[in-house]
Image (cartoon, rainbow, N blue to C red):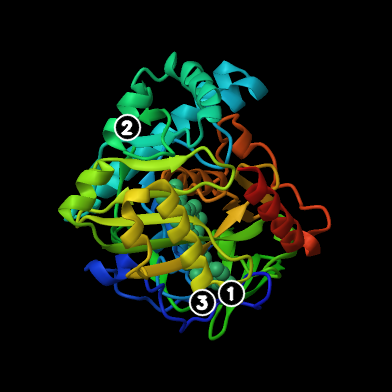
Amino acid sequence: MYDPLVDARPDPQAAPASSYWQAHTHTVWPEPQQPPTQADMVVIGGGYTGLNAALELAERYQQQVVLLEANQLGWGCSTRNAGFAMPGTGRLGYQQWAERLGEQTAQAIQQEYRAGFAQLERHLAACPEQLQIQRGGYLKIAHKASTVAALKRQYEALSAYEPSTRWLDYEATQERLKSPQAHAALHFTHSFGVNPLLLASSIARQAAAAGAQLCPHQVVENIERNANGFTVRTQTQQIQAHKVLICSNGYTPNKLHPALHGRSLPVLSSVLVTRPLTATELAATGLTSQHLVMDTRVLKYYFRLLPDNRLLFGGRGAVRGKDANKAKYARHLLAALAATFPQLQRLSQQPPDYFWSGWVSVALDDYPRIYSPEPGLFTAMGYCGSGVTFTQVAGQRLAQLAMGEQLPALPFYQSELPRFPLASLRRLGQWGFYQWARLTQ
Ligand SMILES: Cc1cc2nc3c(=O)[nH]c(=O)nc-3n(C[C@H](O)[C@H](O)[C@H](O)COP(=O)(O)OP(=O)(O)OC[C@H]3O[C@@H](n4cnc5c(N)ncnc54)[C@H](O)[C@@H]3O)c2cc1C
């Protein structure tokens, strides 16, 4: 598998992820375009961030915008994720923001997430299959009794501002989820599950309809500044642009641009999908297809029942791209599934029907940035594996920034991504962190 810290660039002919979504989704993508030689704006990367930015630039600002995607549109995380639309991004929750920066800022951040949800509803309305939405909310579960008190404190901090948030005690949690690793839960009732591939194609169709030129299989090899802006080179084309928006996120090749070097850690996140659960298995687990579930571990596991009663179960993957598809990482997830649902012992001993991985971008200080590293150049990255909702607004904000607008005074928009100290040793640090997390949780 492509590895951003090892390979010079993604392979334009690499196959899509062998995912459940690819196998079970029929959708229409816009006609591929050939890049022109000139543009107002070049967007690099055709995931949610790049597509929303292109949509905003074409629709709201009538810019001539060209989007260059290395492979197929949505080839990165945006067609590989678990489809949890949650009120958040990065690894900091409401309570942590309130403690760091005060209630007012924490509330303004929540407001930004609401804008992400509003944009998701727009994309849902534009999708004939309604993104195959599953509305039922997101359960953040205390996986150990010792984590209940901290989760309750999060609920108390948040519920004063978000009254739709619910606290589920042990009995109420077990009614929804019969698991020895579910001691209580915080229920975000407004969250929902989507088919991520339908979401990517819905945004792409809208961006194309607004006039954006979407050009798949165009790998950007070089971005060079000149008197009129930038020359952007792909393997076959050369495009002169006034401004460039880098939206390649966790897939950004290490040497794409010096301003980004060492500012993100690409981390593999992996997902498996089982065969459909039998009626007996469903009854034994108490699962319904309503809820999205994630636990309170440092390295989290998450799961949801899909509309056809398969169980999607995800967590961390390998450290290196070359190991991503090794069977032991699927077995690791199956073992976690068995610990969550001992009733599914038989299921967890069968190889999953689908197993795949993708690169998420982790920021040193746990939250993304949308900023301009140098004049005319803009980027958004570092969502730390939580971007389905926030990329919808991040793409819009990035476009607004590129158009010279002032963004809200929120931490995402006020500074650049910090550089990792000893960036060449990022992987070693990651490996050490995994060992520590495995021993402590
Ligand atoms: C397994 C998995 C599960 C996840 N589950 C969830 C979830 O349930 N909820 C949630 O909120 N988030 C989840 N995420 C994270 C979420 O998917 C991402 O935050 C989001 O999709 C990021 O979108 P993006 O557009 O910024 O990046 P991406 O979708 O990764 O797009 C980046 C694109 O840039 C392209 N690119 C890279 N280099 C070049 C180049 N040189 N030239 C041209 N193009 C280039 C890549 O091909 C890629 O398509 C998950 C991620 C993974 C991997």
**Label 2, label 3: how many angstroms apart (C-alpha)?**
59 Å
- Dot 2 or dot 3: first in sequence order is 3
Can you give x and y, in whole percent of width and height, for residue 418 in the image?
74, 47
Residue furthest to the top in view is 160
Q: Would residue 169 be seen by someone viewing this image from the given angle?
A: yes
Circle on res. 373: none
Q: What's under tag 2, amino acid-wise?
A: Gln
Query: What residue is shown at x 23% (from left), y 52% (from top)?
Result: 281
Q: Nearer the viewer, residue 277 or 284?
A: 284
- Dot 1 or dot 3: first in sequence order is 3
Using a 10 Å C-alpha cutoff, classify the residue at mark 1 as few (fewer than 14 neighbours), some (14 to 19) or many (20 or more). Answer: few
Query: What residue is shown at x 43% (from left), y 42% (from top)?
Result: 294
Q: What's under tag 3, amino acid-wise?
A: Thr
Residue bearing mark 1: 323
Q: Are marks 2 and 3 in contact (CB under 8 Å)?
A: no
Vertical side of 141 occupied by 377: above or below: below
Q: What's under tag 1, amino acid-wise?
A: Asp
Vertical side of 298 occupied by 68: above or below: below
Residue bearing mark 3: 37
Q: Would residue 200 be seen by someone viewing this image from the given angle?
A: no
- Dot 1 or dot 2: first in sequence order is 2
Vertical side of 370 occupied by 432: above or below: below
Q: Secondary structure at mark 2?
A: helix
**Label 1, label 2: how many angstroms apart (C-alpha)?**
36 Å
Q: Are marks 1 and 2 in contact (CB under 8 Å)?
A: no
Q: Secondary structure at mark 1?
A: helix
Can you give x and y, in whole percent of width and height, for residue 223 in the image?
66, 70
Q: Nearer the viewer, residue 170 or 34?
A: 170
**Label 1, label 3: how many angstroms apart (C-alpha)?**
39 Å
Residue bearing mark 2: 174
Q: Are marks 1 and 3 in contact (CB under 8 Å)?
A: no
Query: What residue is shown at x 56% (from left), y 84% (from top)?
Result: 235
